[in-house]
Image (spheres, rainbow, N blue to C red):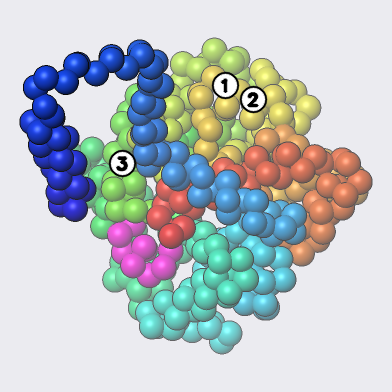
């Protein structure tokens, strides 16, 4: 209003002055033309995407190398010193197993005890780097469950995708409904990542992975993955597509090496279909877990989890720019590939962003040493950490 009043006052002054000018005075000489500078429009405000990216860059630049490396480790929650290790190693997250739902005597934790434990973990992380932890659990349903084994948290075990479909008239709706209810309940407990769904294609009960899948062909599995990932995104929990590039009929890599000799075209026509569907449905909220299978069509020497060629395939052919994580590096299938034991260094060189391991107290110092001696470039660490922070941001963990 003050600006408008001043403008009106100035206009009136000029008008009155013109009216008071004597009629017999000669007209004033015209002012010479002055070329006015064009008015530059104000720049548009930054978009939400630009603001989000700027937040990540500011946070990334505030972290020390040790803190950046720590963010790359999504580790099995230790039986001892869990609180201390969060700050000692600046960990990115904890993966919970059955023992983490129990006390030292083996009794199931009450809901209050469990929630308080996770709250204490997060408080330690916030006091350290200010960055919340990823708290993950394998809640596939059926043979692989953690939280629902605790009767103080859930009345029954989560059902397998095959059982859900068998008991429903519309499998898609049933998968989505179960995923919403299950993952909303996990999120309420403080679990912000569910290492699910299984995106492997298996239609034979003879396959090792069959019971953990939906038991359908590539398109059927893609429909299942889309239903589950969409429901998980909507309720606000992180999803993890596993086990890229696809398990097929391979043996269990917990106990040894699995060599997959299928052609690349067979992967494109079958195994990649559910992963592509899940990546699209997740829209930044899903990660991809890479298996220890050897995919001979791309790399006949290294397990997928340690293979740069397999990760390049994930990034280029499936256009995935989110978090790629290893399967557990403590598994027998990868134990012999790092002669000096620094398997996490190989995993980061291959293109992983998150390392799942039990042996983080050894692996983190080895990664730091690899950066110091030039074996691992700081850019590799920064790129991986940027992806991890961006995933945490997409999950609403960063204020």
**Which residue sits furthest front?**
24
Which residue is nearer to you in this view: 357 or 205? 357
Secondary element type, mark 3? helix
Where the C terminus falls, by quadrant? bottom left
Circles 2 and 1, Cβ within 8 Å, touching? The answer is yes
Residue 149 appearing in the image: yes
Residue 86 figure quarter = bottom right
Which residue is nearer to you in this view: 301 or 202? 301
The residue wearing badge 1 is 316
Secondary element type, mark 1? helix
Residue at 47% across / 76% down in the picture?
119
Question: What is the C-alpha distance between the residues marked 3 and 2?
Answer: 26 Å
- Start-end of magenta stretch: 182-191
- Percent position (x, y) of residue 20? 10, 33
The residue wearing badge 2 is 312
Question: What is the C-alpha distance between the residues marked 1 and 3?
Answer: 23 Å
- Percent position (x, y) of residue 68? 68, 54
Using residue 342 as the reference point, say whether residue 84 is left or right of it.
Answer: left
Please tell me which of labels 3 and 2 falls first in the chain: 3
Circles 3 and 2, Cβ within 8 Å, touching? The answer is no
Residue at 11% across / 19% down in the picture?
24
Using residue 296 as the reference point, say whether residue 282 is left or right of it.
Answer: left
Q: Pointer 2: residues within 10 angstroms few (<14), some, or many (20+)?
A: some
Question: What is the C-alpha distance between the residues marked 2 and 1?
Answer: 6 Å
- Percent position (x, y) of residue 171? 22, 39
The residue wearing badge 3 is 230
Please tell me which of labels 1 and 3 falls first in the chain: 3
Q: Reply above or below: 134 against 288.
A: below
Residue at 63% across / 47% down in the picture?
385
Which residue is nearer to you in this view: 205 or 96? 96
């Amino acid at each position: 209003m003050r600006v408008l009043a001043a403008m009106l006052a100035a206009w009136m002054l000029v008008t009155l002055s013109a009216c008071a000018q004597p009629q017999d005075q000669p007209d004033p000489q015209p002012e010479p033309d002055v070329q006015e500078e064009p008015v530059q429009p104000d720049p548009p405000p930054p978009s939400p995407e630009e603001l989000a990216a700027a937040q990540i860059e500011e946070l990334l630049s505030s972290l020390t190398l040790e803190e950046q490396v720590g963010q790359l480790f999504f580790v099995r929650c230790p039986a001892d010193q869990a609180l201390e290790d969060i700050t000692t190693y600046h960990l990115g997250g904890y993966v919970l197993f059955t023992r983490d739902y129990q006390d030292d005597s083996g009794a199931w934790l009450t809901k209050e005890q469990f929630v308080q434990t996770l709250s204490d973990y997060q408080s330690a992380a916030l006091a350290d780097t200010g960055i919340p932890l990823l708290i993950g659990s394998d809640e596939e349903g059926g043979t692989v469950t953690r939280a629902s084994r605790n009767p103080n948290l859930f009345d029954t075990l989560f059902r397998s995708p095959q059982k859900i479909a068998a008991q429903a008239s519309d499998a898609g709706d049933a998968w989505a409904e179960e995923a919403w209810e299950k993952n909303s309940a996990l999120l309420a407990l403080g679990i912000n990542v569910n290492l699910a769904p299984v995106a492997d294609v298996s239609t034979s009960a003879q396959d090792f992975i069959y019971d953990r899948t939906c038991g359908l062909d590539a398109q059927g599995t893609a429909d299942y993955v889309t239903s589950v990932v969409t429901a998980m995104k909507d309720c606000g929990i992180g999803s993890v597509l596993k086990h890229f590039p696809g398990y097929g009929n391979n043996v269990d890599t917990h106990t040894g090496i699995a060599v997959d000799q299928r052609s690349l075209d067979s992967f494109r026509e079958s195994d990649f279909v559910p992963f592509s569907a899940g990546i699209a449905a997740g829209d930044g909220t899903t990660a991809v877990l890479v298996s220890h299978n050897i995919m001979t069509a791309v790399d006949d020497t290294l397990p997928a989890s340690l293979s740069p060629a397999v990760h390049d395939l994930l990034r280029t052919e499936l256009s995935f720019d989110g978090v790629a994580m290893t399967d557990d590096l403590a598994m027998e299938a990868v134990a012999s590939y790092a002669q000096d034991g620094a398997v996490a260094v190989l995993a980061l060189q291959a293109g992983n962003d998150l390392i799942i391991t039990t042996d983080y107290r050894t692996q983190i110092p080895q990664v730091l040493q690899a950066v110091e001696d030039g074996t691992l470039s700081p850019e590799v660490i920064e790129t991986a950490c940027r992806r991890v922070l961006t995933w945490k941001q997409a999950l609403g963990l960063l204020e």
